[in-house]
Image (tube, rainbow, N blue to C red):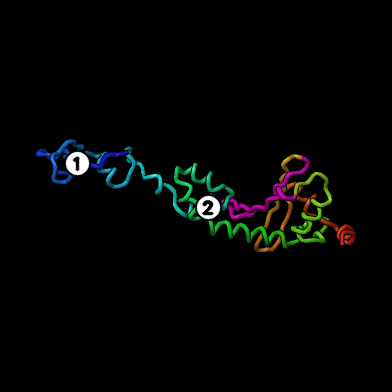
């Protein structure tokens, strides 16, 4: 429990605040009127740095979230409370969800093989259904944007007890999705014959 003190008066030489149990009581404590006190009154840290809550802007928070960092990671890196970051996370999550949905609705374009017979979301679902040891409940889609503005759509899923990751590049201007790794191609591309057999 912190004991509350009140300013009673200024010292005769003007160099200290005299504090007491009540504003009109007898002074029992003093605080030097110096640069540290002035900084504290302005909400700054004792060493003169900006307060933690002001050390990262909402725009920077959202940029880091958009790039794939979690709320907890952004808060820890910036030294701010989690709820301050969470305040700005909603619009970013909505944007990322929309990117995932758009990529899932597009057919994977494979060099020399053309487009997948199924859109990405359905192709991945069908491919995972054909594998043994897949835990469908672990499948997690996410999206992140690089500083250059490129979107990466990612799927994390546990297969045979091992975490597997597939990543695709999503080009919203062209409405095109392309693989960034062999596993992404394996899961995301279905040729016409295979699609016919599945149908």
Asked whether residue 146 is drawn in magenta, I would say yes
**Proximity of marks 2 and 1: CB atoms separated by less than 8 Å:** no
Q: Quadrant of residue 51?
A: top left
Asked if residue 196 lies left or right of residue 146, the reply is right
Residue receiving disc 2: 63
Q: What stretch is highlighted in magenta?
A: 136-160
Q: Is residue 3 above or below residue 190?
A: above
Split into 4 quadrants, where in the image is the C terminus? bottom right
Disc 1 residue crowd, few under 14, some 14–19, many 20+, Cα 10 Å:
some
Split into 4 quadrants, where in the image is the N terminus? top left
Disc 2 residue crowd, few under 14, some 14–19, many 20+, Cα 10 Å:
some
Asked if residue 37 lies left or right of residue 73, the reply is left
Q: In which quarter of the image is residue 188?
A: bottom right
Dot 2 or dot 1: first in sequence order is 1
The front one of 74 and 87 is 87
Q: Main secondary structure of the magenta part?
A: strand
| Residue 121 locus on image (x, y percent) | 74, 58
| Residue 125 locus on image (x, y percent) | 77, 55
Asked whether residue 174 is drawn in magenta, I would say no
């Amino acid at each position: 429990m912190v004991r509350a003190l009140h300013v009673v008066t200024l010292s005769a030489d003007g160099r200290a605040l005299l504090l007491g149990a009540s504003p009109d009581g007898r002074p029992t404590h003093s605080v030097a009127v110096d640069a540290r006190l002035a900084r504290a009154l302005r909400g700054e840290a004792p060493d003169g740095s900006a307060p933690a809550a002001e050390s990262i802007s909402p725009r920077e928070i959202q940029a880091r979230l958009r790039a794939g960092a979690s709320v907890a990671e952004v808060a820890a890196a910036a030294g701010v409370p989690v709820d301050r970051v969470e305040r700005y996370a909603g619009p970013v999550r909505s944007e990322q969800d929309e990117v995932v949905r758009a990529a899932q609705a597009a057919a994977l374009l494979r060099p020399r093989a053309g487009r997948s017979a199924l859109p990405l979301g359905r192709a991945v679902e069908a491919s995972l259904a054909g594998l043994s040891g897949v835990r469908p409940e672990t499948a997690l889609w996410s999206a992140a944007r690089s500083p250059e503005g490129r979107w990466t759509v990612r799927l994390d899923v546990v297969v045979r007890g091992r975490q597997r990751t597939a990543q695709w590049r999503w080009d919203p201007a062209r409405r095109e999705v392309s693989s960034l790794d062999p596993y992404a191609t394996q899961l995301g591309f279905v040729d016409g014959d295979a699609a016919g057999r599945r149908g």
